[in-house]
Amino acid sequence: MVKTPKLVYVLILILFIFLDIIKSNRVVVTIGGNCIRDKDCLKFYGANIRCRKGKCVAI
């Protein structure tokens, strides 16, 4: 009797953790202004900043 609700609870937790990981990997932070090349973007220690679609973004 207890096994079924416990299994459903664990499956829901795994699903939400998986969806949270997917969502967190899709976050794109815009840093700085417009750019044409990667060299136009500001340099930050520990961050990989590149020019994408005319904006500086952290990858």
Image (cartoon, rainbow, N blue to C red):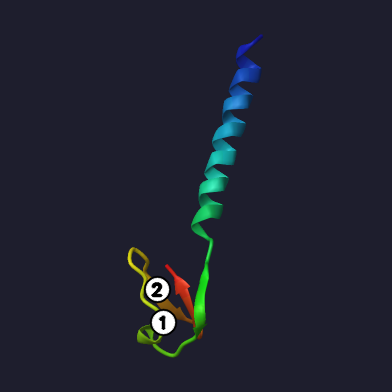
Name which residue lies at 43% across and 81% down.
Answer: 51
The Cα atoms of the two marked residues, 2 and 1, are separated by 7 Å
SS for dot 1: loop
Q: Of 59 and 10, which appears nearest the observer?
A: 59
- Residue picked out by circle 2: 49
Q: Secondary structure at mark 2?
A: strand
| Vertical arrangement, residue 11 with respect to residue 56, above or below | above
Q: Is residue 3 above or below residue 13?
A: above
> On the rendered image, what quadrant is the N terminus found in?
top right
Percent position (x, y) of residue 19?
A: 57, 46
Image quarter of the C terminus: bottom left
Kind of residue indicated by mark 2? Ile
Image location of residue 21, percent across then percent down: 51, 48
Q: Residue furthest bottom?
A: 36
* Residue type beneath disc 1: Cys
Residue 36 placement (x, y as % from top left): 44, 90
Mark 2 touches mark 1? (CB < 8 Å)? yes
Residue at figure coordinates x 41%, y 82% from the top left: 41
Residue picked out by circle 1:
41
Q: Residue at x 59, y 40 (%)?
A: 16
* Residue, far left: 45
